[in-house]
Amino acid sequence: MYQLKMHSTSLKSAIVSAQNNIIFGPINSRRFGMSLGIDLSPANKQCNFDCLYCELAPSATVNKQTQTICVADIITALKKHLHDKIDVITLTANGEPTLYPYLDELIDAINEIKENTQTLILTNSATLVNEKVFASLLKLDEVKLSLDAISSDIFRKIDRPHQDINIKNIVQRVIDFSKIYTGKLFIEILFVHGLNDTQSEIQKLGDVLKQIKCQRIDIGTIDRPPAYPITGVSYKELHDIALAFDADLPIHIASRVHAEANNVYHTKEDILNTLDKRPLTMDDIHLLFDQKSIENLEDLLTCKKISIKKVGNLEFYIPTINLQRKRKKNKDF
């Protein structure tokens, strides 16, 4: 039996005590079903990218976590929320989840208690160059790897990586991973107007995608409030991009439609925590919240703890403090 271990500060990491917001959701994911999220960086953003389209406020990149939570606290929190209606346990973070230093033993611990629930990680792919991370991800049921660009200059403009991160190395490791991984592998590409939507870059992406063995390739664009003043592409443009790729590739245009309702009660604290991790539209809210929860949301709007942010034709509900933080940190790129 795997034993949970308390960690020392030998890695010079500050250990953050367990907080209510380690676990968030469940959220009816457009692509992965009813998802219960584990935030591996609940205190602040810790990421090796500072993507233009990120939902979180802009921040300096890092190559390791300096504030961490212990595995035992995560498992304790997970046990309180895990039930048989959850389709997938999603490892994510306010930043990049694979920077979590105890990822391997956390995955082992989750695998001991998850029973039939799937495990999933959402990663930007950069740490696949690390052999330990590469091996750890092989233990998961599902892996979603982001790959926004192939050209080094476009990659650096969109994803704004930490120094010394090389897209050529990442691409090769994604290909390598796809050839030996036995779970469900998903590739995600997010298109930004005027950057990776050019014919040349789409061709380069297509050439690489043909070398990757995966379950699905999700292409999408900006549909949540971004960290920087950029714009996405239209649905028609996404459709045209999909048609430009090889017909044998499993391309899927990410969409909100066809989600099944899961109307449950959320306290005001639950609502703020959920919106902190993922801004929601009213369509999302009607799928997720019962009537009392919607009344709680309306109260939060009235007292201005929640604000509405318009992105294209969609209106997102977001904690006001997050919106203010983004405005304060927003800058040209």
Image (cartoon, rainbow, N blue to C red):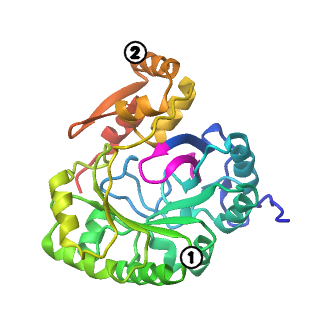
Q: Residues within 10 Å of mark 2 (few under 14, many from 20)?
A: few
State the image coordinates of residue 187 (x, y, percent, origin top left): 40, 67
Does 57 sit above or below residue 2? above
Residue nearest the observer in this picture, 97 or 287? 287
Q: Residues within 10 Å of mark 1 (few under 14, many from 20)?
A: some
- Residue type (three-letter) at the residue carrying disc 2: Thr
The numbered mark, 1 or 2, whose residue comes first in the sequence reads 1
State the image coordinates of residue 175 (x, y, percent, origin top left): 43, 82
> Residue 61 falls in which quadrant of the image?
bottom left
Separation of residues labelled 1 and 2 (CA atoms): 49 Å
Q: Mark 1, mark 2: which one is toward the viewer?
A: 1
Q: In the rendered structure, which segment of residues is drawn in magenta?
A: 28-43
The tag on residue 302 is 2
The tag on residue 182 is 1
Kindly identify the residue that appears in the image at 46 percent across and 35 percent down: 261
Kindly identify the residue that appears in the image at 62 percent across and 45 percent down: 22
